[in-house]
Amino acid sequence: MDHNQKYRKKTGEFYTPSSVVDFMIERVVNQLVSSKRVELGSYHQFTESLSKLRFCDPSIGNGNFILGLLKWLWNVLRSYSNVDGKLKADFFYHFVTSNVYGVELNSNALEICKTRISKTYSIFQGESFVNLKCGNSIIDVDAKNMFSSTQLSKMNPFSWEESFSEFDTFDVIIGNPPYFNLKKIETRTEGTQLLFSYLKNSNHWKHLFRASSDIYYFFIMKSLSLLKNDGIVSLITPNYWIENQYADLLRSEILRYQILEIIDLEGIKIFKDEGRWLNVSTCILTVQKRSTNQTFKFVRKLPKNFFELKKSSRTLPKHLSINPSKLSTTKWIISQYLSTIKEISNNKEFDKLGDIAKIAQGLSPGVKDVFVLDQLELKINKIEEDVLVPFVTNRHIQRWLISKKADLKAILPSRINELSEYPNTQKYLTKNKSLLTMGPDRKRLMEKNKIRWFDYSVYRNLSTFNESKTKIMCPYRGLLPRFSLDKEKHFGATDTYAIVPRDEKDTLAILGILNSSFTDFWFREAGKKKGKMLEFFSIPLKGIPIPPKGERTKISKYVKQILSLLNQVDERDEIQISKIEKELDSEIAQIYGLEQDFLMQYSSKNK
């Protein structure tokens, strides 16, 4: 991997394909034309209207958005065939050097952008592009009062007011900001630690700071603050901010403006790195600075090949009209079924799963490959039984029951007082000591005497896994709800969750609800998603509405029948199981006040 690739991985910079850039520019131009801020009727009308607008990309990268804007402009100019070519070239040159702005942290990327412009359009040979600057768009010059000169050299503070002559904000801000989580990257480099500290303590940002924010939150907020009245921001970012609990302050800021549209790209893969598609689910957010607060368009479920289609063939699916006054800052539920969701949520007879069950994330071994062994490895190394616990991975957790192929066991070091008391385990762990003592996180924990060299990194929820005789387990992500009954005291890693009902009699009813089409509906419309994947994390699990005690018994009988059929030694009767699952869905729909066939129709539509 070359230096630039390593840099992009650390800073979350992945460049936007030209098809996406062209689409975003087209959408912004349509807004400008519809509001008559850009007039296409004649060459004179076009150039006069456009010359009043200032465009900016706050995270230039290698210049894809600026090159896209220039391509659009040059194509429009060329369409006026009756106008002298030199006149058009002179306008093009003057507009690009006077009305196009941008900032980029990486000086090498900035030079690539300038070189690309000059190579594409010969009239810019030797042009310095004084309005394309190097700096950090979200670190202002107040950092000079907070850090040493050595630290500042790693931060590259940037003053928008001082850097651009006659600074007067912008009419259009468009681009693709970097993506990385501040908390996860905080300790990786000195530069990112300084950025974290600045955002946390600066007067510009401390009132909007969340430790678990993503860096693109600040780029969105900075872009909004740089708008003129009626100015437009259009950015492609991950779509997690719509639901993420740590994006509450960002959502509050966005609601101060007029959202024009959000196009949720869900599972469409946009970015590549070293030839591989990145698993980043994105959206295109377009916002305008104006006092009115009208409904906005929310578009989702685009075809996967949307950006591969010819422009003439691209048709956006039917949009939802969303009233921003109905959106909460805590979490946005954007759904055509919002009234149904609110009716169920506000039903005071229903419990929340978090009130009647404990939700526990799996343990964090740190080096799972060392601690988790299959039957052959256990036999070869003769690990003592006293230190072993049954262990499941994501693939073992199926609907209703743990897979019978789950034959893994894990060494649980919390059961070891003196390692020498278990000579075979000691021999095995010592053989892997180099793996167990490497990595900054484990080293730091050992230095602080938080763990022994052979311990797990974090014994999260250890007592829950040790003490619960019966629980429900699920993977933390899945295309469909997948919850297993566990009576074998299985342990899992951080990519699994355990649900332990406070009243064991509720277990089967809860299992039935979690595996039903209702939970599929609830998580797709009101839960948490990453692209097409449903995220069964602690907070969304806790919020699932559960019917009152009297109704739960109606559900348990169906689950007993399903489990009985699944436990048969002979071949499973899949047809009968499917029939009972449909009956269960029908019963659950009735309990939640839904139409009898609602869940069936919803489920078939989303498969």
Image (cartoon, grey):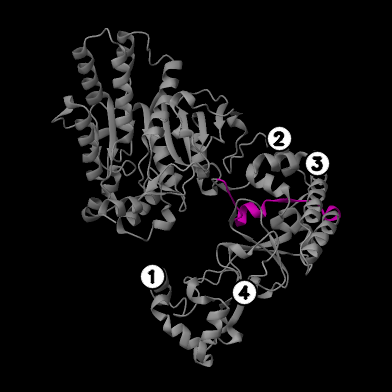
Residue 551 on the magenta span: yes
- Kind of residue indicated by mark 2: Ser
Instruction: Name which of mark 2 and mark 3 comes first in the sequence.
Output: 2
Is label 1 or label 4 in front?
4
Badge 2 crowding class, 10 Å Cα cut-off, few under 14, some 14 to 19, many 20 or more, is few
Q: Which residue is mark 1?
A: 439
Q: Position of residue 91 (x, y in %)?
A: 23, 17
Instruction: Name which of mark 3 and mark 1 comes first in the sequence.
Output: 1
Instruction: Name which of mark 2 and mark 4 comes first in the sequence.
Output: 2
Please name the residue shown 65% across and 72% down the image: 490
Please name the residue shown 77% across and 52% down the image: 578
Instruction: Name which of mark 1 and mark 4 comes first in the sequence.
Output: 4
Magenta range is 532-552
Q: Position of residue 238 (x, y in %)?
A: 47, 43
Distance from disc 1 to disc 4, alpha carbons, whole Å, reads 29 Å
Q: Which residue is mark 2?
A: 339
What is the residue that sits farthest to the front in this orientation? 571
Dot 3: element: loop
Distance from disc 2 to disc 3, alpha carbons, whole Å, reads 12 Å
- Of the 4 image quadrants, the one containing the C terminus is top right
Instruction: Name which of mark 1 and mark 2 comes first in the sequence.
Output: 2
Dot 2: element: helix
Q: Which residue is mark 3?
A: 593
Q: Which residue is mark 4?
A: 407
Q: Position of residue 506 (x, y in %)?
A: 79, 61
Dot 1: element: loop
